[in-house]
Image (cartoon, rainbow, N blue to C red):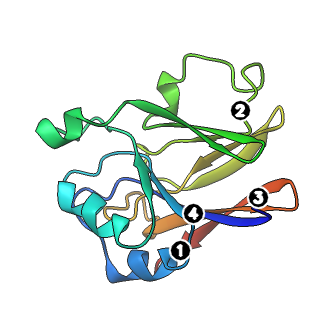
Amino acid sequence: MDNYCIGVISDTHGTLTRAAVTALEGVNMIIHAGDIDKQDVLANLRTIAPVIAVRGNMDAGKWALELQKTEMVKINTFTIFVLHDVQQLNNHPSKDRYNAVISGHTHRPSLERKNGVLFLNPGSAGYPRSNFPPSIALIHIRNNSLDAQIIDLE
């Protein structure tokens, strides 16, 4: 897998827009960082690519209880830790050798590296706040490097 693309989405709150679907077309995998709100969102995302999702604080019901609060995704030599609220991160990503930590919850997109670990929040695809546009993110794994970009959906 020399050229692998992961679509990252969060805080859809029951809304999966056409712009989000279009932005995710062609990805190899989708990670949803929680606050899905409706099971149909995951079903629709699965028509695009395989989905890994975590349960957010707004996810309730039997379908949501089947989701874990955290997931660890391994792609090639890269390990990605996924949770909804980064403030609940109980471990040390660089010590635990995570290459990336994906979270949501704040509805604010952010992308930064700390101690060699990529911290990514794709923002909210369905319910943006604080004058941020709806957004998702893409993670590109190419030639043994991991990079990400935020995609505004407006």
Q: What residue type is disc 2 on?
A: Tyr
Side of 82 where 3 appears, left or right: right
Dot 2 corresponds to which residue? 98
Measuring from the top left, give residue 128's x and y in whole percent: 37, 62
Dot 3 corresponds to which residue? 147
Residue plotted at (52% across, 56% down): 122
How far is the residue under mark 4 from the one under mark 1?
A: 8 Å
Secondary structure state at the residue bearing disc 4: strand
Closest to the observer: 152 or 3? 3
Dot 4 corresponds to which residue? 137
Circles 1 and 2 in contact, beta carbons < 8 Å: no
Side of 150 where 39 appears, left or right: left
Nearest-to-viewer mark from 4 and 1:
4
Dot 1 corresponds to which residue? 152
Is 127 rendered above or below residue 63? below
Secondary structure state at the residue bearing disc 3: strand
How far is the residue under mark 3 from the one under mark 2?
A: 14 Å
- Name which quarter of the figure residue 97 lies in: top right
Residue plotted at (43% across, 65% down): 131
Q: What residue type is disc 4 on?
A: Ala
Measuring from the top left, give residue 80's x and y in whole percent: 63, 40
Q: Earlier in the sequence, mark 4 or mark 1?
A: 4
Residue extending furthest toward the left: 61
Nearest-to-viewer mark from 1 and 3:
3
- The quadrant the N terminus occupies is bottom right
Q: Earlier in the sequence, mark 3 or mark 2?
A: 2
Q: What residue type is disc 1 on?
A: Asp
Secondary structure state at the residue bearing disc 1: strand
